Amino acid sequence: MRVDVFTIFPGLVDTFTSESLLGKCRIGGLLDLRCHDLREHTTDVHRTVDDSPFGGGAGMVIRPEPIFASVEAADPPRPLFLLGPGGRRFDQAFAAQLADSAGFSLLCGRYEGVDHRVREHLVDDELSIGDVVLSGGEVAACLVIEAVTRLLPGAMGNSDSPIAESFGALGLLEEPQFTRPAQFRGWEVPAVLRSGDHAKIDRWRRAQALHRTARYRPDLITARGGLSDDDLRLLEEFPSEAYP
Ligand SMILES: C[S@@+](CC[C@H](N)C(=O)[O-])C[C@H]1O[C@@H](n2cnc3c(N)ncnc32)[C@H](O)[C@@H]1O
């Protein structure tokens, strides 16, 4: 998959994506990441990309020229998304959709954002990572790239992982996970997980995923059309583990 990123801080994106799973995917050729420095397309000695906003007001705005020039020179994969708090909310379902494509591109704003003509005439859509304001789009770009890349076939060791995960095909939060030791400071791993009864473990896991989702994200239960009779039976069979 090819992903192009347009930014005034290419090093931020490059560093983050050079480590861990993303780094392996880049080395292995699964992720062809190309970072473009908007300052390469400025014309003054100071490599200025920003200017004050028309109409006055606080802060600076990225000018349209370096953005248009950089994108036109790179001919990046589309869709090209501007990252911004006013955009469509990025979520797991959209990550899966992008992972199914040949590639996409991300434009990172800074300061007060980018000249609106970029939004109107250059990008295809705007993506937000949540109702929060960052200083720049680079962290948002890294978030999108990581969420999408880990879903690419071959990126993760266990190909079943994305299905059972939170927001996966089950539409639930994942159940709690435990590892050794079985006893830690007097806190014990649930006995069912050590029982060897795999059918029972599966039912327990699903019940705990339902409990956890009902408690922390009841909107996800509503989105699935509520609890089925099967779900209700499971919840009765396995009471909730304590969630802090
Ligand atoms: C300080 S923000 C600009 C915020 C803008 N003045 C506003 O109030 O909507 C600078 C840049 O950070 C990025 N950014 C900030 N919050 C974001 C979010 N929630 N999702 C995606 N990108 C974000 C965008 O690229 C944005 O242009």
Image (cartoon, rainbow, N blue to C red):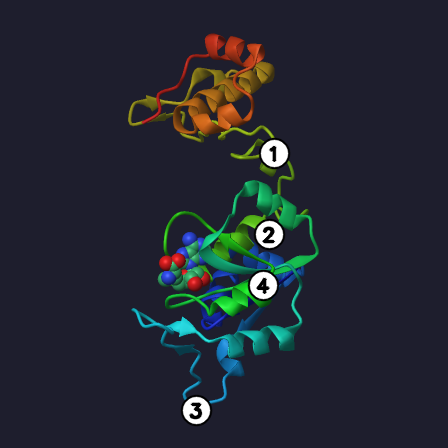
Which residue does the numbered mark 4 point to in the structure image?
123
Alpha carbons under labels 4 and 3: distance apart: 28 Å
Alpha carbons under labels 1 and 4: distance apart: 32 Å
Which residue does the numbered mark 3 point to in the structure image?
45
Residue 155's spot in the image, x, y percent? 63, 49
Q: Which residue is drawn at the image coordinates 50% and 84% (left, top)?
A: 42
Which residue does the numbered mark 1 point to in the structure image?
163
Q: Secondary structure at mark 4?
A: loop
- Tell me if residue 134 can be seen: no
- The local crowd at label 3, few if under 14, some if 14 to 19, many if 20 or more residues have their Cα within 10 Å, is few
Q: Is residue 64 left or right of residue 96?
A: left
Q: Is mark 2 within 8 Å of ligand 1?
A: no
Near-viewer residue (14 or 98): 98
Q: Quadrant holding ligand 1?
A: bottom left
Q: Which residue is drawn at the image coordinates 60% and 52% (left, top)?
A: 149
Q: Label 4 sits on what residue type?
A: Val
Mark number for residue 176?
none
Q: Is residue 147 left or right of residue 183?
A: right
Q: Is residue 108 above or below residue 229?
A: below
| Upstream in sequence: badge 2 or badge 4 | 4
Alpha carbons under labels 2 and 1: distance apart: 15 Å
Q: Label 1 sits on what residue type?
A: Ile
Q: Secondary structure at mark 1?
A: helix
Q: Nearer the viewer, mark 4 or mark 3?
A: 4
Which residue does the numbered mark 2 point to in the structure image?
149
Residue 232's spot in the image, x, y percent? 51, 11
